[in-house]
Image (spheres, helix red, strand yellow):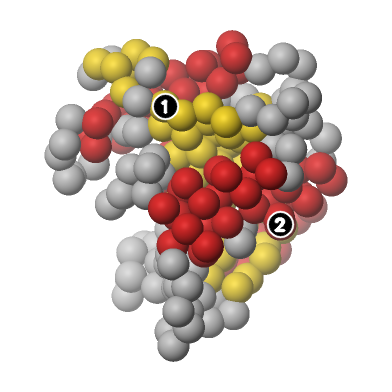
Amino acid sequence: MFDTVKGPVSARSLRPPSPFATLVVAHGAGAGMDHPFIVGFAGACLDEGLATLRFNFQYLEAGRRAPDTEAVLRDAWRAAFEAASERREREPVWASGKSLGGRIASMCAADGEIAPAGLVFLGYPLHPPGKPERIRDEHLYRIEVPMLFLQGAADPFASPELLAGVVDRLGDRATLIPFEGAGHSFEVRGVKRDPLAAGASLAAPAVAFIRDHP
């Protein structure tokens, strides 16, 4: 556990022998750090030699469903990143998150509240479903570290055309890997795959990207 302005929150650390990097992983709005998607992703990263630290935001720690204010979410991210940085050996620390967790990480990075070696988005919420005019990209252009967007091509939170345009404008800093037919949680209509496997399937491209950007 570690402390935030709203009290302590739970965290889980997985470390292989001599990890090449540590990835801090934040959950999405509706499920915490022990959701099978996050567990599957973290476990598969461990198998690839990547350490992870995943954590709960305070509202889920307290049993509430509505997310905290942006300021409280940011504070939790700062505390999580600091905890991961203190536990590492010499490896770089990256930031990652599912949906809301990734967006808050990117905002913290853009404003210098955390200093990750790079960012890995597990489904970036570029805009609310059905409202592409409310695009959330302004802060991304202030981020100077490498960014990987792992995105379902059928995700209602990110029009493929709009996201591709954002990544193009980000230039060499950003890479987009689309998953054909996949939704916001990387589920594919008509294909039976549990969330654990869906999360685990994202580890290989994430690990490859981090290894390519030491």
Disc 1 marks which residue?
A: 11
Residue 205: assigned label: 2
Secondary structure beneath dot 1 equals: strand
Q: Residue at x 60, y 14 (%)?
A: 87
- Kindly report which numbered mark, 2 or 1, lies closer to the viewer in this rendering: 1
Left-right relation of 45 to 56: right
Residue 83 x %, y % = 51, 16
List x then y, in percent, for residue 120: 61, 47
User: What residue appears at the point 25 percent right and 16 percent down from the top-left corner?
Assistant: 7
What residue type is disc 2 on? Answer: Pro
Q: Residues within 10 Å of mark 2 (few under 14, many from 20)?
A: some
**Vertical arrangement, residue 18 with respect to residue 5, above or below:** below
Q: Secondary structure at mark 2?
A: helix
- Visible residue check, residue 142: no
18 or 148: nearer the eye?
18
145 or 132, which lies in front?
145
Q: Could you tell me how far apart the alpha carbons at marks 2 and 1 are, in whole angstroms?
A: 24 Å
Q: Residue at x 23, y 19 (%)?
A: 6
Q: Earlier in the sequence, mark 2 or mark 1?
A: 1
- Nearer to us in this view, 186 or 129: 186
- Spot occupied by residue 96 in the image (x, y as percentages of width and height): 55, 42
Placement of 158 over or under 145, stated as above or below: below
Res 179 quadrant in image: bottom right
Quadrant, the N terminus: top left
